[in-house]
Image (cartoon, rainbow, N blue to C red):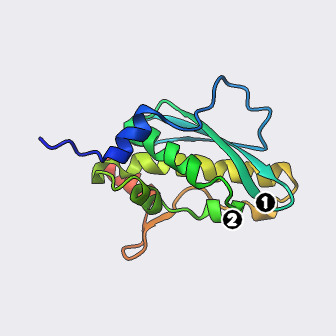
Amino acid sequence: GEWAYTEKLKEHFESPKNVLQGNDTSAFDGVGMEGNLQCGDQMMVAIKVDKESEKITDCQWKTYGCASAIASTSILSEMVKGMTLDQAFNISPKEVAKELGGLPENKIHCSVLGDKALRAAINDYFIRNGMSDRVQKVQARTVCQCMNVTDHDIEEAVLE
Ligand code: FES
C-alpha cells in the first residue's frame, strides 16, 4: 500500500536531531522519563534551562520507541529550543504532528511519548529549583479539544 509517512518524518527518523549520547544527564537541569502504555516503549528527555529567562537552551532525548516516536521527539527537541518552560509545557501533540506534515492516526500515541517526557523534565526542573507549586500533571492531557479526549483515553482505548 501507500507509504504513510511524510518526507519530513522520514528525514527526522533517518537523521534524528539532539539524541543524547550515553547515559550521563548530570549536565542537564531537568530530566523526564515516560513509558507508553500501549507498546511498552520508553522515552527520556533532558533539558538545559536559562534560569533568568526560563528559556530552554538545550533539549536532548533517547528512546527505544518506534520511527514515529523518534521523528516526533526529534522535531519536538528542535521546536522547544528558545521557548520558555511554560510555552514548551503547552506544546500539543497536534502541533508536533503538524510540523511533521501529519502522522498516521494509529501513530498519534507514539508522538505523545516525547511530549510527556518533556513535561516530566520541566516538572523535574521545577522540583529541583524549589518550585514544586508549578508542577503540573503529566498524564491525561487533552489531545482533542472538541471531543475532550486525553492522551490517557487514547492509550486506554488502544489497550482494549
Ligand atoms: Fe511504541 Fe510508537 S509503537 S512509541
Q: Are marks 2 and 1 in contact (CB under 8 Å)?
A: yes
Q: Secondary structure at mark 2?
A: helix
Tell me if residue 39 can be seen: no
Seen from the viewer's position, the closer of residues 86 and 12 is 12
Residue 25 picture quarter: top right
Q: What is the x, y in percent for residue 110?
A: 41, 45
The image shows residue 139 at horizontal and vertical percentages of 55, 56
- Image location (x, y in percent) of residue 137: 63, 60
Q: Residue at x 81, y 62 (%)?
A: 53
Residue type at mark 2 is Asp
140 on left or right of 133: left
Q: What residue lies at 39% left-to-right and 42% top-to-bottom?
A: 68
**Is the shortest distance between ligand 1 and the CB of mark 1 under 8 Å?**
no
Which structural element holds mark 1? Answer: loop
- The residue pinned by badge 2 equals 86
The residue beneath circle 1 is 54
| Quadrant occupied by the N terminus | top left
Residue at 68% of width from left, 65% of height from top?
A: 86
**Rendered location of residue 57, percent (x, y):** 73, 49
Real-space Cα separation, disc 2 to disc 1, in angstroms:
8 Å
Q: Earlier in the sequence, mark 2 or mark 1?
A: 1
| Left or right of 113 on screen, residue 26 | right
Marker disc for residue 155: none
| Residue type, label 1 | Glu
